[in-house]
Amino acid sequence: MAVGFEMRPAADALGVSMSQLTKLFRKVPAAWVAINRLREEAGLPRLK
């Protein structure tokens, strides 16, 4: 299921909380940079 870089639907699809998913991305700096770049390209705000 595609969720368009939205964290809530992605977390729900994975069966984790939005906070857990965000923490996972933050643990891998390259992933954090990539997700924020992709979100910006999709017109979404950067994650904090």
Image (cartoon, grey):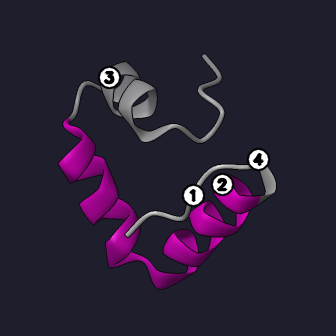
- Asked if the residue under mark 1 is in contact with the one under mark 4, i.e. CB atoms within 8 Å, the reply is no
- Residue 21: x and y in percent read 31, 49
Q: Quadrant of residue 26?
A: bottom left
The residue singled out by tag 2 in the image is 39
Q: Which residues are magenta?
A: 17-40
Q: Amino acid at mark 2?
A: Arg
Alpha carbon separation for disc pair 4 and 2? 5 Å
- Asked if the residue under mark 2 is in contact with the one under mark 1, i.e. CB atoms within 8 Å, the reply is yes
> Between disc 4 and disc 3, whose residue precedes?
3
- Asked if the residue under mark 2 is in contact with the one under mark 4, i.e. CB atoms within 8 Å, the reply is yes
Neighbour tally class for label 3: few under 14, some 14-19, many 20 plus, Cα within 10 Å: few
Element type at marker 4?
A: loop
Q: Is residue 38 magenta?
A: yes
The residue singled out by tag 4 in the image is 42
- Residue 42: x and y in percent read 76, 47
> Between disc 1 and disc 2, whose residue precedes?
2
The residue singled out by tag 1 in the image is 45
Neighbour tally class for label 4: few under 14, some 14-19, many 20 plus, Cα within 10 Å: few
Alpha carbon separation for disc pair 3 and 1? 20 Å
